[in-house]
Image (spheres, rainbow, N blue to C red):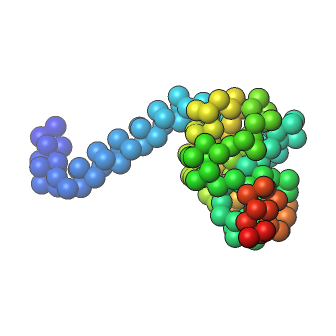
Amino acid sequence: MDQFIQFVTEHYILSTLWLVVFFMLVTDIVKNRFSNVTLLNPQNATIATNRGGVFLDIRSEEEYAQGHIYGSRWLTLQKIREGDIKALDKFKDAPIVTVCNYGNTARTAAALLAKAGFNKVSVLQGGLQAWKSANMPLSKGAPTSGAAKAKKKK
């Protein structure tokens, strides 16, 4: 025990960093455990959306146009934050799988949708990069949402 105390006092910066990392890890585990948003791998996400659900791509319009999951809907995180989610009303009780590049931003979108009353919100774990790694197909082309159509008319 004396060696431990000596190490901590001599290496207080390193010890503090370890405590911060430990705290962040525990916080992330607890948050994921009690979250009503689930993480799905590409295969399970496909199964969920094939049962009447939808993929919701929250990346930028340019990223979406470069490659997206076939049949996915496009809605930016900003629109979700603003509450402009009328396009998703018919999926209130259906599985919604949020998609971003790596899965981190999609968690935020999924949590906001769950707060807005959507019952079966999930995140594509690893995002579109995991989808590509699983050799799943991609489509290319601009989004077909009402917002994108209005933008093109201008």
Is residue 99 depicted above or below 132 in this figure? Answer: above
Residue for point 88% across, 41% down: 50
Whole-percent x, y for residue 154 in the image = 74, 70
Left or right: 26, with 71 as reference point: left
> Which residue is farthest front?
154
Above or below 71: residue 26: above
Q: Is residue 65 left or right of residue 22?
A: right
Q: How many marks?
A: 0
**Can residue 103 be seen here?**
no
Q: Is residue 18 left or right of residue 76?
A: left
Q: Splitting the image into 4 quarters, where does residue 90 fall?
A: top right
**Residue at 24% over, 55% down:** 14
Q: Position of residue 145 (x, y in %)?
A: 79, 56
> Which residue is nearer to you in this view: 142 or 86?
86
Q: Residue at x 58, y 53 (%)?
A: 78
As drawn, is 151 to the left or to the right of 76?
right
Residue found at x 16% / y 37%: 1
As drawn, 118 above or below 149: above
The foreground one among 35 and 135 is 35
Residue 5 lies, in percent from the top left, at 14, 43
Q: Nearer the viewer, residue 154 or 136?
A: 154
Give the x, y percent position of residue 20. Answer: 31, 47
Residue 142 visible, this angle: yes
